[in-house]
């Protein structure tokens, strides 16, 4: 007859082996789901639309009174037009920053 310690040691070893086997089987089941869930990234757009707006300020030296700043980069012309409409809607911002416009640029890889 085996001692109690020997029986407990066998039980622990069997439990470790079972847990290891279950972990391997569970990982094998999850691997295809993870691969299927990852979709390839869509290709970048052929061009982007950069929305600019002018900025004016009172320069005491009179050297620089205007500049352009980028208001945003958009992937469609429609989105750029909406952004411009939003910028033009506020008369206070239009007074501070001037007019807004967009320009298309090709995307380079």
Image (cartoon, grey):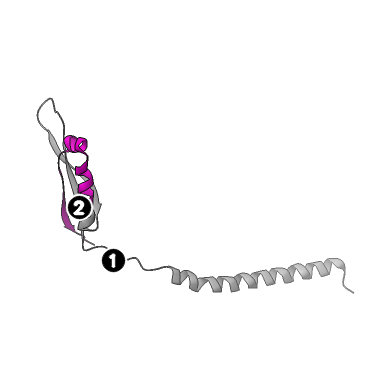
**What span is colored magenta in the figure?**
80-109
Find numbered disc 2 in the image and state the secondary structure of the residue it sits on: helix
Q: Is residue 50 left or right of residue 19?
A: left
Viewer-nearest residue: 38 or 28: 38
Q: Which of the two labelled residues, at mark 2 and mark 1, occupies the earlier sequence position?
A: 1
Left or right of residue 99, residue 79 in this image: right
Rendered location of residue 31, percent (x, y): 51, 71
Badge 2 is on which residue?
A: 81
Q: In which quadrant will I find the C terminus?
A: bottom left
**Is 106 a magenta residue?**
yes
Name the residue at the top extreme.
60
Measured as percent of width and height from the top left, residue 30 is found at 53, 70
Indicate the quadrant containing the N terminus: top left, top right, bottom left or bottom right. Answer: bottom right
Image spot of residue 93 (x, y percent): 21, 37
Q: Name the residue under label 1.
A: 43
Q: Is residue 100 above or below residue 34?
A: above
Where residue 57 sits, quadrant-wise, is top left
101 lies above or below 47: above
Q: Residue at (20%, 55%) from the top-left corner?
A: 49
Query: Does 91 appear in magenta?
Result: yes
The residue at the point 64 percent across, 71 percent down is: 22
């Amino acid at each position: 007859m085996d001692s109690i310690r020997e029986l407990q040691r066998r039980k622990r070893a069997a439990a470790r082996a079972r847990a290891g086997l279950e972990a391997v089987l569970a990982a094998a089941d999850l691997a295809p789901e993870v691969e299927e869930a990852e979709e390839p990234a869509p290709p970048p757009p052929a061009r982007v639309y950069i929305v600019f707006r002018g900025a004016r300020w009172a320069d005491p030296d009179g050297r620089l009174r205007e500049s352009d700043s980028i208001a945003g980069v958009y992937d469609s012309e429609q989105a750029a037009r909406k952004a411009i409409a939003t910028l033009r809607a506020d008369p206070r911002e239009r007074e501070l920053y001037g007019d807004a416009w967009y320009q298309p640029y090709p995307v380079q890889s």
